């Protein structure tokens, strides 16, 4: 008889069942924090990883149950971090596109929470009980703040110009200066927007010079719109020339054409030292329709604002594209609250408050952070509005320059991994923490995040 073959014990047989792990006290606590479904998935992923390690000969013994739960907890924390997270903006760029542009006012946040928690009259006229306009609450505010005859709002600035051209240009031609064929952001360019709007682009002038006569010569039987695009995120200097809005408005009236002006930034009030036109100024200059963003200098949520004459706005209301680019109830609530602040208390809009800070305020904030850390040198710094706004206007700010105990790129990477993440600037091998977009309440946790990287 052949001798019996000894049985080799396989560690995978000792892996616990998911249900047994879920009964452990640590797992019960995780379920309260993350939800039972998420914890179950994390435990299964952890067990599958252990099976692979055992199969590859990398693990001889199965970890105890509480250690498996601990590994699963790490997965859950990492999964939560992989989504949207709060960050502290220490770059000195207020409207940082990669960090969500304008932070909202407390009133705007409260308005969003109120409508998100239940039902609201988003398309209900409470006076008549009939279906109402989705933008019924914000249109009167926009008209009051800008002097426009009519107003509309959609989900972003690109959508505003897309809707305008789709409704007014149709399958006709849109005339625009070659010097204004800008890239809006994320690779989207004005020629692309015109094409997607169903119109044909007619370029006039040259990159650096476009005169009124260039527009006049290009107008033909297929012309539907004259388009003026404000160069809100760059400047051309030197040997340049352009037709003004008022000149184009005169030509548009002469030829019976609508003039559409895309301002980009959405400035409601004149800013000292700024060359940005306000919405009201563009309308007074004769633009039939003005489009801009709501989350830049206006300081509200992401939105596209459309303002102008009744005869120019009405075709947009009837266009089927409007439904595809409409605002949701939470954005409408935040936008309404922001516009009300512009009317009643503009200093409470965070963007306006940050851009209006004095150097003394910024110096004091830098001194407080240095005191909390016990390290760093305060330096003058140049900050910017950002978000394609006020590209030439440098803002005198203050930054705390820190010498890290590690490579500065490693330090920046570490700061991006903490909670909340910290995003600063790197210059000459040092980490700069600019004060312009940092709130006073952020200083204690900012200091806590910075301590591990200090030398």
Image (cartoon, rainbow, N blue to C red):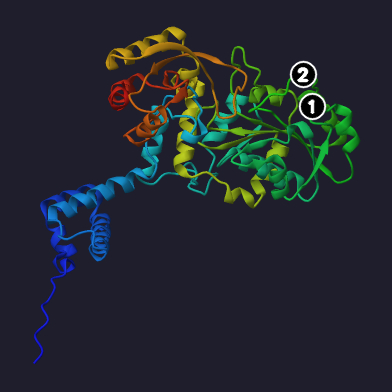
Q: Residues within 10 Å of mark 2 (few under 14, many from 20)?
A: few
Q: How many marks?
A: 2
Cβ–Cβ under 8 Å for marks 2 and 1: yes
In which quarter of the view is residue 228 placed? top right
Judge whether residue 91 can be spotted in this image. Answer: no
Decide if residue 333 is on the left or right side of residue 238.
Answer: left
Q: CA distance from mark 2 to mark 1?
A: 9 Å
Residue 208, numbered label: 1
Q: Is residue 95 above or below residue 314?
A: above
Q: Give the residue furthest to the top.
A: 360
Q: Position of residue 377 (x, y in %)?
A: 38, 12
Tell me where residue 85 appears, x and y as whole percent: 37, 38
Which quadrant of the rendered structure holds the C terminus?
A: top left
Q: Position of residue 176 (x, y in %)?
A: 78, 36
Give the label on residue 11, or none: none
Seen in the image, is 222 located left or right of residue 182?
A: right
Question: Residue at 27% of width from left, 25% of height from top?
Answer: 448
Q: Quadrant of the N terminus?
A: bottom left
Which residue is denoted by mark 2 in the rendering? 238
């Amino acid at each position: 008889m052949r001798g019996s073959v000894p049985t080799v014990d396989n560690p995978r047989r000792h892996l616990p069942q998911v249900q047994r792990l879920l009964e452990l006290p640590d797992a019960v606590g995780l379920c309260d924090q993350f939800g039972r479904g998420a914890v179950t998935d994390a435990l299964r992923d952890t067990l599958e990883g252990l099976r692979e390690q055992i199969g590859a000969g990398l693990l001889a013994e199965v970890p105890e149950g509480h250690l498996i739960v601990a590994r699963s907890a790490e997965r859950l924390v990492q999964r939560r971090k992989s989504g949207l997270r709060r960050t502290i903006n220490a770059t000195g760029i207020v409207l940082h596109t990669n960090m969500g542009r304008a932070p909202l006012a407390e009133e705007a946040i409260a308005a969003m929470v109120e409508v998100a928690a239940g039902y609201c009259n988003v398309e209900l006229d409470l006076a008549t009980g009939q279906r109402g306009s989705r933008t019924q609450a914000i249109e009167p505010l926009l008209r009051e703040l800008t002097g426009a005859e009519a107003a509309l709002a959609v989900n972003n600035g690109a959508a505003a110009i897309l809707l305008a051209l789709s409704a007014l240009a149709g399958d006709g031609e849109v005339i625009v200066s070659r010097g204004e064929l800008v890239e809006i952001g994320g690779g989207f360019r004005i020629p692309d927007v015109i094409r997607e709007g169903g119109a044909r682009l007619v370029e006039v002038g040259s990159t650096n010079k476009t005169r009124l006569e260039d527009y006049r010569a290009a107008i033909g039987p297929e012309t539907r719109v004259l388009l003026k695009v404000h160069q809100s995120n760059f400047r051309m200097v030197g040997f340049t020339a352009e037709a003004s809005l008022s000149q184009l408005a005169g030509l548009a009236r002469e030829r019976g054409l609508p003039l559409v002006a895309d301002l980009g930034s959405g400035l409601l009030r004149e800013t000292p030292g700024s060359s940005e036109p306000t919405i009201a100024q563009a309308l007074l200059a004769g633009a039939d329709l003005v489009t801009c963003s709501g989350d830049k200098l206006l300081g509200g949520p992401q939105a596209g604002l459309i303002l102008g004459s009744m005869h120019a706005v009405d075709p947009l209301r009837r266009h089927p594209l409007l439904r595809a680019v409409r605002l949701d109830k939470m954005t409408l609530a935040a936008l309404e609250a922001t516009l009300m602040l512009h009317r009643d208390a503009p200093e409470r809009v965070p963007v306006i408050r940050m851009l209006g800070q004095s150097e003394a305020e910024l110096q004091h904030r830098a001194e407080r952070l240095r005191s909390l850390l016990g390290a760093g040198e305060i330096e003058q710094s140049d900050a910017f509005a950002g978000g394609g706004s006020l590209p030439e206007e440098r803002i005198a700010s203050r930054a705390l320059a820190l010498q890290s105990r590690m490579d500065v790129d490693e330090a920046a990477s570490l700061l991006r991994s903490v909670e909340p993440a910290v995003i600063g600037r790197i210059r000459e091998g040092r980490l700069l923490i600019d004060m312009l977009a940092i709130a006073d309440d952020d200083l204690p946790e900012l200091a806590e995040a910075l301590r591990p990287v200090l030398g």
